[in-house]
Amino acid sequence: MKNFKKILILTGFISILGTSLLTASQDLSAQSKKNLRSANMHLGGNRTEKALPLYELVLEENPNQIDALNNIAAIYYDIKTDYPEARKYFIRLIDVINGIFAEYEELKLTDEKKAKKFFKENIKKPKLEEKLEAVEQFKDNCIIKMVNSGKLKIKSEEYEAAIEIFTNIAEIVPDSTITYRLMALCYEKLDDIENSKKYFIKTAELDPTDIFAKQKIASLYFNESNFIESGNWYLEAAKNDTANTSDFYNAALAYKNAGNDSLSYSAFQKALEFDPKNMNIIVTLSNIALSLNDNEASTNYLQMAVDIDFVDGTIDNPIYVTTLSYKLYGLKKFDELIKYAEMWYNLDNSSKEAVQMLYNASKELNDQKLMDKYNKMYQEMQ
């Protein structure tokens, strides 16, 4: 009962004696006044099951009776924890209070003196402005309470029950992104992928900055082998997650799985901008460039990979050096070939192919000194 009393203090509408705060708009018959007093007495004694029907009888006669509306709302909010029902009564209460303000504004237009008296008795004295603010806060808190109760259902793995709660919230607040996101997660737990995807998409539509929702959509499409849609959604996520290379990387993988080298290549290039020393991305770009018949770009990326690999003075991937040497030879980049073919030879000083390539490169460059050097090396290997 402690929390309930707190509500009554905050809203300020309760009187255990049942005296109505407002005048004409709160008029009741003798029987309804008796019902209101009895209801308040039962409420004070924590007998809400007896208080509630009496308050409802009061509202049957006067649907705008503030005490009855307030106390029914408080009962549903704090005791029954039926937040959708509590919210309905809070909304009715807000409408009544706003009606009183409207009555005052209308009165000011015709009788200033009467309006001042009305304001003093019906707005200032009961501190109606403060009370309206408090009731609006409780109305909004109902949604928060509903969301929290849904989260508790998720925690206890009662996903169907959680979905029911979130569905009710969505009917009340159709633009609540957290509601749709949590519904999507529940459906995913139930392996209802279509509904999970549906509500993640709804979340992303309502909040285009929701990176998590977009990534989840992309992941669900990927698991369905719908790789183009998956890649598209990863790129959507990347628009709002510009410091994260994983969205571009995942998009590239999705497009690669779809067999779309062009889209994959573009996405990997964006990923490389954020992670310029990622060997896996660089080598993949080299391979894709080759499949796109861009041998020069393929060679450039492979050269980049070798340079990164050699930054500590050792080579972990000798095959990259060998492949790069052949590529450079094919492109007739003989100056650069000398560097990498020598690297190849240092890795394997028994490789006649490396020495032959060095000799041929020096011959193409018309460098007699180098030709003599590599010819001598080759003769020594015979």
Image: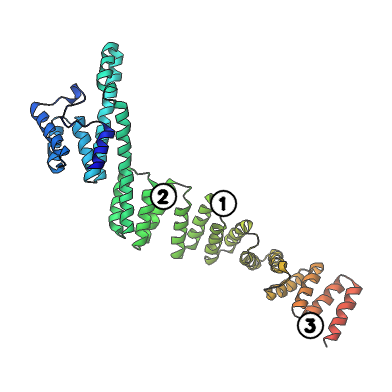
Is 184 above or below relative to 366? above
Quadrant that contains the N terminus: top left
- For disc 2, the marked residue is 203
Q: Position of residue 301 (x, y in %)?
A: 68, 64
Residue for point 19% across, 24% down = 25
Side of 109 relative to 62 (left or right):
right
Is 150 above or below relative to 349? above
- Residue closer to the observer: 235 or 72: 72
Q: What's the CA distance linking mark 1 and mark 2?
A: 20 Å
The three-letter amino acid code for the residue at tag 1 is Thr
Whether residue 192 can be seen here: no
Helix, strand or loop at label 3? It is: helix
Side of 287 relative to 330 (left or right):
left
Give the numbered dot on residue 68.
Answer: none
- For disc 1, the marked residue is 242
Helix, strand or loop at label 1? It is: loop
The three-letter amino acid code for the residue at tag 3 is Lys
Colour scheme of the picture: rainbow
Helix, strand or loop at label 2? It is: helix
- For disc 3, the marked residue is 352
**Which of label 1 and label 2 is nearer to you?**
1
